[in-house]
Amino acid sequence: MNRGYLNPQLLIDIADVLAVVLVLICVMINAKSNGCLLNAVIKYLQTMEEQTSENKIELLDLIPFCNYSIEVKAYTRKGDGAASNPVFCRTQEDVPSEPEDIKALIMDSRTILLSWKPPRYPNGRIRKYKVYVKSLDGVSLERDQYDLPSEQTYYSISHLVAHHRYEFWVTASTIVGEGSSSRHVVQSAVNHVPARIASFGGHVITVWKEELKLPCLTVGQPNPHIQWKKNAKRIHEDNHLQVNSEGTLHIASVQITDAGNYSCSAENIFGKEEIQYIVSVQVPSAPTNFQASSSTTASVYVEWQPPTAMGSSIKGYYLHFKREFGEWEQISIPAHETSYTVRGLQCGTRHQLYLQAFNQLGKSSPTPIVSLHTQGAAPVAPSNFDLIHVNSTSIALNITSWRDGGCPITSFVVEYRLKHGTDWTLVSNNLKAEQREYFVLDLNPETWYTLRMTAHNSAGSTVSTYDFVTLTHSGGFVAPELIVHSEYGQEGIYSNIGIIITTAASLIIVGVSSLGFFLYMKKKHETYLANKYGGKPSEIGLVADMDNVGGCDSTSTVRGNNMKAAAVMCQNAQEAAFLSTPSRVSFGCREDISPYATFLVPNHINIDGSDKGSPLSSDQCFHYQPSERSSSSIQSVQMKIPSRTRSENEVVDWIPLHSLHQSNRY
């Protein structure tokens, strides 16, 4: 259920009676009152409230010449309604209070300096001061009162008679009239003038970073010596602290460290006087925990904690912000707020923000600067297929294929050139995103081009290039180019030291492993032969003495094309010969001899090398004879086989026939 609010309006009349404001409340109901109207609440000075059931009220005991903000809220049993717009008003002036203090100081035998402090409650604008003089000894005076401007708070009265007493007092006046007089002081002019200070010390409250002046106006004959101290230590002048010719101390841009006790002393041979100032620096505390917690494409939400200590209650906050490379802007925020949403920011842009509290003393120190990006990114380029539609002499660009990245695209720049050319042709430098399609004309058929398109939005710019080829005159497609990347092959394997080291290490490992495996297999093979034949591995396959080899029982010759082989019968079935070729040939009763090999040795060769010209007996030798089809130029191969008697238990050696194999390959 929607609730209707009361919207009161204020009509204010300033009464003739000073410091009284008459407020006429006219309640205009613009919606349902949602109940019986009970009362109206009048708020002013933020801390004072009055209630009334009437349509007017008198606010009493207000401060003269003071600004007030007044608002009215009507309420029912359910609570307060909406407040009216505040109305600002000021009470009328009144007569001021008396000057706060006064001094009468001897300057010489005929002159007295009078100084005073302004009224504590001026109750308006001080128009003038009036100084009154009265002789207590009945001496006549030229004048007994003097009118002085409001800016002046001292005055020297001359033409007095020495050693006569005079009475002085001062009043202040506003437009309403003259206020009460100050206290009365009595002084006599004398010849000897001691050092005196006409200024007034006291408690001084100043604002941070403001200029402060502490006066120290002196009198005396001879002229007194003036010295300023801070916290009992002599002040040395610099750019920050300076004393002028009248003895006034100037403090430029007051800082927190300037707070303390200041004293000014004046001294001559007749006397000495000192005044003190207690200086307090009011520094508005900065808000704490200032942070930006979230953002959208056009806004940033910030929050903070109120200041923990202030010279007085805060009046509000100043939020300062700017986009990157922009100018600082300022927003005023009410004092009761602890969060705020900054709107109207630029999409996808980095922003900087900081906060200050303020009151009647001034602004606080700023919080640390917070940086935050609003949401959004630069445009996103489409693919070649989505963007470009090719014709023979033109292309059509689908502008809607570009994605904005969250921030609206403001404009495009379109350029093209020959694919292998260098000069770009500008087609448009301000193509609007609202245009859905754009044509690039005057292209050549069957020609390769490069298109460059730049999209802009507030978050940035995106540049993208596209290669395309126009169609033939008849509208046909052109075969794509064979593209060889210029970088191909320029970076060899040797350009990478890591690859070189890895490859070398791998090769070394493989080589060592292979060598080890080969040696291992060789050793294993020799060991196997030694174990099988009972000899040293180095002697296996060697024939030291062939006398023990038995002769052949018969010979077999292979003639003609029949290529038939006869069995070679040896006396001992265990005898065998070892060939240097992969085949092993046994000279025993074996049936696995190749049928294409014949063994015939034409002449018996003794161990001494003589040729007896007769076939060997079966117990002496065997013969190898190549077939008749072999060339006659091929010489018979003779193999010296020494003959000796062997025992029955002697192991038959394998006979290497590598000489036979090398001369007649079969």
Image (tube, grey):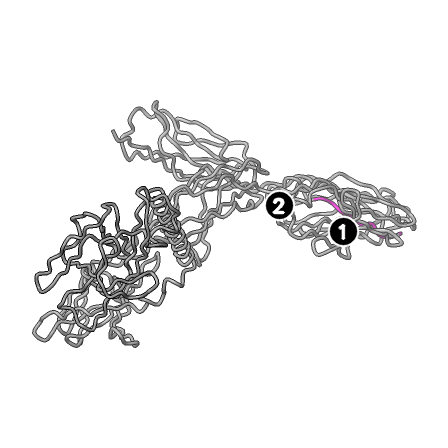
Q: Nearer the viewer, residue 355 or 478?
A: 478
Type of amino acid at the residue the image marks with label 2? Val
| Number of the label disc, if any, that sits on residue 287 | none
Magenta-highlighted residues? 109-117
Q: Is residue 624 magenta?
A: no
- The local crowd at label 2, few if under 14, some if 14 to 19, many if 20 or more residues have their Cα within 10 Å, is many
Q: Quadrant of residue 402?
A: bottom left
User: Which picture quadrant has residue 437?
Assistant: bottom left
Name the amino acid type tagged 1: Tyr
Measured as percent of width and height from the top left, residue 148 is found at 70, 52
Closest to the observer: 585 or 178? 585
Q: Which residue is mark 1?
A: 155
Is 662 drawn above or below residue 195 in the view shown? Answer: below
Quarter-of-image position of residue 629: bottom left
Element under disc 1:
strand
Q: How many marks?
A: 2
Give the label, 2 or 1, closer to the camera.
Answer: 2
The verdict on residue 110 being magenta is: yes
Identify the residue position indicated by label 2 in the image.
207
Nearest to the observer: residue 310 or residue 36: 310
Q: Which type of secondary structure does the marked residue at label 2 adopt?
A: strand
| Magenta stretch, overall SS | strand
